Image: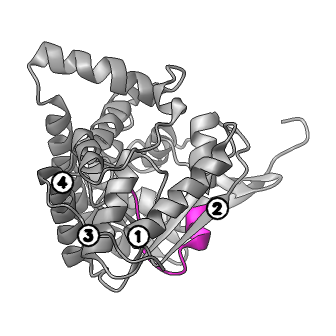
Amino acid sequence: MSRPRLLPEGPALLEVRHAVRRWVAAHGADTGVAVALSGGADSLALTAAAVAESGPVHALVVDHRLQEGSGAVAEQAAARALDLGCASARVLTVSVDRDGGLEAAARRARYQALGDARAGRPVLLGHTLDDQAETVLLGLARGSGPRSLAGMRDFDAPWGRPLLTVRRGVTARACEELELDPYRDPHNLSPEFTRVRLRSEALPLLEQILGGGVAQALARTADQLREDGEVLDAIAVRVLADAESEGGLDVAGLVDIHPAVRRRALRLWLLGNGARDLTDRQLRAADDLIGRWRGQGGVAIGGGSPGARLVLSRRHGRLTLGQTAIGPDR
């Protein structure tokens, strides 16, 4: 293990350190963390701050192998982690299958590798306030509902995000104070990626039109929606506990519940019983089996197994979830 660098006390790095210090105090990670290090400004500043504010820091560098020379970039990031004082640094080489688009496939591969290598530790990610604003704007454009607009949590075990109150420009200045030259990923400049266009075109235009403060306002909106959502989720848990019966749900215990709470209770129950990738359309169709019952048939839900799909049905005042075989002609 390399000796930790004596960190400068410039204002940007101190802001990053204070954010990490608050996160560690709130979530009890002073015994050690893993950090997802790309070599970019956000993750470099986070790594330096974590070494100063947390217990042993173990850097995890994911090499997606999507660009020529990516292995050398990953090795350089690992070397910098050790120079900053990390207890260890590992390069994780992954394969990206590209199913569902390059961005989504790379994200899946990255999170899988980080999850496998974290050794029970929380993994700190370098998402900033700007990333939060982009996430909220994407959710708004897709009509994904309040759960998506609530953005990213500062801790969604095992993923920690200490920098959600820190602007991207601050991490860049922190690296200048550290006399580090961050890696600049060409993918972060490519207009083929939606987030890049949001970052380089949409958000600056909104800032210009609305007179600034858009990113902070979007992040505040996420915080407010997350707080509201946590209250509704807590109510939904109690509603679900009263309605569950012998592997199903009693409709009588749900029919008078407000649809906003009822859908949350349904979502919790469906996900707990094997459903995956629930869409808003599926959830509303499932809710219609309670609130708009006209004798309709079952609702196909994402999940199931090869050759069968999950179907939610209503019979004799109860909702049950079962698998229905998919015929060869379907």
> Does 241 sit above or below residue 44?
below
Residue lying at the far left in this picture: please name it.
Answer: 211
Give the image location of residue 285, x and y in percent: 49, 41
**Residue kind at label 4, given as amino acid type:** Asp
In terms of sequence position, does the residue under pointer 3 or pointer 1 come before the other?
A: 3
Q: Which mark is residue 292?
A: none
| Front residue of 168 and 137 | 168
**Residue kind at label 3, given as amino acid type:** Leu
Give the image location of residue 37, x and y in percent: 47, 57
Mark whose residue sits in front, 4 or 1: 1
Give the image location of residue 126, x and y in percent: 37, 53
Q: Residues within 10 Å of mark 4 (few under 14, many from 20)?
A: some
**Residue kind at label 2, given as amino acid type:** Leu
Q: Which mark is residue 157?
A: 1
Q: Secondary structure beneath disc 4?
A: helix
Q: Residues within 10 Å of mark 2 (few under 14, many from 20)?
A: some
In terms of sequence position, does the residue under pointer 3 or pointer 4 come before the other?
A: 3
Residue 319 visible in rendering: no
Mark 1 to mark 2 CA distance (whole Å): 21 Å
Mark 3 to mark 4 CA distance (whole Å): 42 Å
Mark whose residue sits in front, 3 or 4: 3
Mark whose residue sits in front, 4 or 2: 2
Mark 3 to mark 2 CA distance (whole Å): 28 Å
- For the point 19% across and 51% down, the residue is 165
**Residue kind at label 1, given as amino acid type:** Ala
Task: Report which residue position mark 2 lands on.
Answer: 92
The magenta-colored residue range is 113-125
Mark 4 to mark 2 CA distance (whole Å): 38 Å
Task: Report which residue position mark 4 lands on.
Answer: 228
Tag 4 and tag 1, C-beta contact below 8 Å: no
- For the point 26% across and 73% down, the residue is 52
> Does 315 sit above or below residue 90?
above
